[in-house]
DNA sequence: ATGGTTGCCACGCAA
């Protein structure tokens, strides 16, 4: 099984990239973030023609998430208890014996901003939902754009970034509270060095200079970690013309 | 400290 997560930063613009990458990488499941499309405009037919079932929760201009899978998606959830939120940032579904929760975590703008407070509150409510999901589903994957770099290895210049947004201790504590539910950052099962990123700012030639962050994560339960065979970041789509600022991250497992 | 770039939408906001 190959799972993937990709913040496409507008599915309207990035649909050709998505279709190309699905053909190249052939993931069994992929979570998308920042589709930026109302459901009525979602390109479901093109995705079905590419051989994927798809569920989605979108809105105009901002946010929007989707889950694609080779097999049918059931028990779809787009709103969670305690989180009365018009922003479309979460979609969960079951594929066979696998439960997948796909997140587009709030960016937060800046430490202390009202969006930052919303981010921490949002993460707390998601943690509570994941606690319940982890109890219900032994094989649980929580993927998405977390908008949090787990530790300094995940930051191109940790000293310069300091404790700014995406790296502040409260954000990292919120991520840790989710990991404490019995989940692990699958990438770190296979790569312990720093310098591997999933997002590079469009500005200042961030990608060319590898000035990035690793903020796109696939967290997995122990049952999945046991069978994990590879966790990778595919930088190639970031080299394509008119790319998303994020590139896909992957996890492969057997059984 | 600020601004750089992209997307959406048609101005400035969000990232």
Image (cartoon, rainbow, N blue to C red):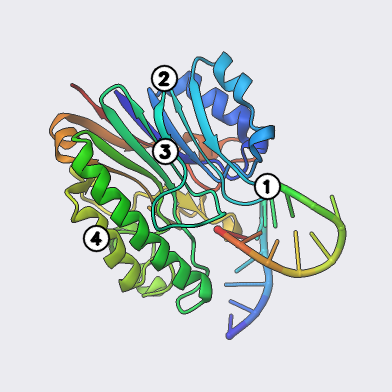
Q: Foreground: A143 or A198?
A: A143
Q: CA distance from mark 2 to mark 3?
A: 18 Å
Q: Quadrant of residue A75?
A: top left
Which residue in the structure is indicated by mark 3?
A5
Residue drawn at (24%, 60%), measured in percent from left and top? Answer: A176
Measuring 18% from the left and 35% from the top, which residue is drawn there?
A: A138
Side of A43 where A165 appears, left or right: left
**Image position of A92 (left or right of A178):** right
How far is disc 1 from disc 2 in space, using C-alphas?
Answer: 26 Å
Dot 2 or dot 4: first in sequence order is: 2
Q: Are marks 4 and 3 on the same chain?
A: yes
- Asked which secondary structure carries label 4, the reply is helix
Quarter residue A38 falls in: top right
What whole-number distance in Å separates the C-alpha atoms at marks 4 and 1? Answer: 32 Å
Which quarter of the rendering shows the N terminus of chain A? top left
Q: Is residue A75 left or right of residue A182?
A: right
Query: Does mark 1 fall on the same chain as mark 4?
Result: yes
Could you tell me which chain the residue with mark 2 belongs to? A
Nearer mark to the viewer, of 1 and 3: 1
Foreground pick, A130 / A142: A130
Residue A122 visible (yes or no): yes
Q: In the rendering, which numbered label is found on residue A176?
A: 4
Which structural element holds mark 2?
loop
């Amino acid at each position: 099984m190959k799972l993937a997560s990709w913040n496409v930063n507008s599915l309207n613009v990035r649909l050709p990239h998505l279709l190309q990458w699905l053909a190249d990488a052939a993931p069994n499941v992929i979570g998308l973030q920042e589709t930026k499309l109302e459901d009525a405009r979602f390109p479901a037919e093109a995705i079905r023609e590419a051989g994927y079932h798809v569920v989605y929760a979108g809105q105009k201009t901002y946010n929007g998430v989707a889950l694609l899978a080779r097999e049918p998606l059931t028990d779809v959830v787009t709103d969670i208890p305690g989180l009365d939120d018009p922003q479309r940032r979460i979609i969960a579904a079951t594929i066979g014996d696998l439960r997948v929760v796909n997140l587009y975590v709030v960016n937060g703008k800046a430490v202390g901003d009202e969006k930052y407070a919303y981010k921490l509150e949002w993460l707390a409510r998601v943690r509570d939902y994941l606690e319940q999901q982890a109890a219900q589903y032994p094989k649980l994957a929580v993927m998405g754009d977390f908008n949090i770099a787990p530790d300094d290895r995940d930051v191109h210049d940790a000293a310069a970034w300091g404790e700014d947004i995406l790296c502040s201790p409260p954000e990292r504590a919120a991520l840790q509270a989710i990991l404490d539910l019995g989940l692990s950052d699958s990438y770190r099962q296979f790569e312990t060095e720093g310098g591997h990123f999933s997002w590079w700012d469009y500005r200042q030639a961030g990608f060319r200079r590898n000035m990035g962050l690793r903020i796109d994560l696939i967290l997995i339960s122990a049952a999945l970690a046991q069978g994990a065979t590879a966790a990778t970041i595919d930088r190639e789509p970031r080299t394509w013309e008119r790319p998303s600022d994020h590139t896909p991250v992957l996890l492969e497992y057997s059984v």
